């Protein structure tokens, strides 16, 4: 017997028919002798519909009432699943976030979990009842409903699994697991049977949307095994855990990419101490996130200073950069919002040389020019023109032999 927390995403519970299929799956796990707790998202596009209603009702919805409204989506799905389980002879009981209680910061829209009270859930599991918990929501110290932000149901599931000392937290959705890259772009992308917390965090931060970053960080901090599984099909999925020292890590595990990039370059900036701070400080003060930064070699006392931001911040960042360098003779601000970031990720990069060489050689062979480079211990990212995105991903996927079937 194992104690397992399962989380089902919105597309997996998008209709009563799909909820019935989830009930069948949970019932099988329960009847096999396992203790099972389930976390659900709202049904299908329910949250998007509630968001639209809020903005029809008010130009700027009150944050507290906005959270009260959005939390209603999960109430429907958990009640329906509890009914379906009981109809199959499985004792079940639904819980909203405040009923558990999932205690959060007093912040609406992006609250972080502080504590989980699992006394009632423990009692349910021990007496053979399946608790069905609303994801994405909690309660602050004043009793106000709070929400955790998009993808927050993943974090709810991980927090419950940690509090319940579960053997595994399973994230079930409409994907078979974590792939070496997006299979919609590269049809021969391979399912990864095992991946480390470090790798999945890098891939998530670089554009992969399989799991919420906060959920992976939480699981990694508590050494909780995560498994990504298909909700309505059989399969072992992908296990996310710590690297095992006796296993040979793959050189590169996956190729991640992000379309949400824009490049800004300040040309002929004076080469003197404090110039980078002068440029970036006002950008940071306006909550514009800067990613890649490149400062070229000085020539005649001048340098070119380049950085990237999210595309939604592109115009504002250009304006702020121009204001920051106003009064500096000869400085020109140019930009390009038609760029993307492609990254190779793998813990095996720690102990192998030549990854960058192979990467640049493969891209050059296809005539793809690299505009910027950023590295960490287990990743190399390059900025390229957007028109080369698919070609670049396919080229690197082949160059690092990720199209070979994995065991």
Image (tube, rainbow, N blue to C red):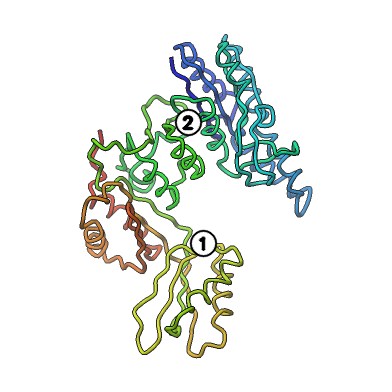
Left or right, 343 with reference to 21: left
Residue 354, percent from left and from top: 21, 58
| Residue at point 25%, 62% (across, down) | 360
- Of 389 and 98, nearer the camera is 98
Query: Can you say whether 274 is above or below 156 in the image?
Result: below
Total labels: the figure holds: 2
| Residue at point 52%, 21% (across, down) | 21
Category of crowding for the residue at label 2, using alpha-carbon neighbours closer than 10 angstroms: few (below 14), some (14–19), many (at least 20)? many
- Of 190 and 126, nearer the camera is 126
Question: How far apart are labels 1 and 2 at the CA level?
Answer: 29 Å
Q: Secondary structure at mark 2?
A: strand
| On-image quarter of the C terminus | top left
| Residue at point 73%, 50% (across, down) | 55
- Tell which circle, 1 or 2, labels the residue nearer the N-terminal end: 2
| Residue at point 49%, 79% (across, down) | 333
Residue 9, percent from left and from top: 54, 34
Which residue was labeled with disc 2?
Answer: 172
Residue 72, percent from left and from top: 70, 34
Query: Can you say whether 398 is above or below 240 in the image?
Result: below
Label drawn at residue 106? none
Q: Quadrant of residue 104?
A: top right
| On-image quarter of the N terminus | top left
Q: Secondary structure at mark 1?
A: loop
Which residue was labeled with disc 1?
Answer: 310
Category of crowding for the residue at label 1, using alpha-carbon neighbours closer than 10 angstroms: few (below 14), some (14–19), many (at least 20)? some
Q: Which residue is situated farthest in the top direction here?
A: 89
Query: Can you say whether 172 is above or below 28 in the image?
Result: below
Residue 317, percent from left and from top: 55, 70
């Amino acid at each position: 017997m194992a104690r397992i927390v399962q989380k089902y995403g919105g597309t997996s519970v998008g209709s009563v028919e799909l909820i019935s299929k989830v009930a069948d799956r949970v019932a099988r796990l329960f009847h096999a002798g396992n203790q099972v707790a389930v976390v659900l998202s709202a049904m299908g596009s329910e949250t998007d519909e509630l968001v639209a209603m809020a903005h029809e009702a008010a130009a700027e919805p009150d944050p507290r009432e906005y959270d009260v409204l959005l939390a209603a989506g999960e109430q429907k799905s958990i009640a329906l699943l509890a009914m379906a389980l009981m109809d199959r002879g499985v004792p079940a009981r639904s819980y909203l976030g405040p009923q558990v209680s999932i205690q959060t910061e007093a912040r609406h829209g992006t609250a972080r979990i502080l504590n989980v009270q699992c006394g009632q859930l423990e009692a349910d599991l021990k007496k053979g009842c399946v608790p069905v918990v609303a994801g994405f929501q909690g309660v602050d110290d004043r009793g106000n409903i709070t929400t955790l932000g998009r993808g927050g149901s993943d974090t709810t599931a991980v927090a419950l699994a940690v509090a319940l000392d579960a053997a595994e937290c399973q994230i079930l959705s409409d994907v078979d697991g974590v792939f070496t890259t997006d299979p919609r772009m590269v049809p021969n992308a391979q399912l990864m049977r095992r991946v480390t917390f470090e790798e999945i965090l890098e891939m998530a931060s670089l554009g992969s949307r399989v799991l919420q970053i906060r959920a992976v960080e939480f699981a990694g901090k508590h050494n909780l095994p995560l498994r990504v599984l298909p909700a309505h099909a059989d399969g072992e999925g992908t296990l996310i855990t710590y690297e095992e020292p006796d296993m040979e890590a793959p050189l590169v595990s996956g190729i991640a990419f992000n379309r949400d990039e824009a490049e800004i370059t300040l040309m002929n900036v004076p080469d003197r101490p404090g110039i980078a701070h002068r440029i970036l400080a006002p950008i940071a003060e306006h909550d514009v996130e800067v990613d890649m930064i490149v400062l070229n070699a000085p020539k005649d006392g001048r340098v070119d200073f380049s950085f990237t931001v999210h595309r939604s911040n592109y115009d504002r960042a250009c304006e702020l950069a121009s204001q920051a360098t106003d009064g500096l003779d000869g400085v020109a601000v140019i930009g390009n919002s038609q760029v993307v970031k492609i990254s190779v990720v793998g813990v095996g990069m720690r102990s192998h040389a030549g990854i960058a060489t192979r990467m640049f050689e493969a891209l050059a062979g296809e005539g793809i020019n690299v505009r910027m480079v950023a590295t960490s211990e287990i990743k190399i990212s390059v900025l390229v023109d957007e028109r080369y995105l698919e070609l670049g991903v396919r080229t690197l996927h082949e160059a690092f032999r990720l199209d070979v079937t994995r065991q």
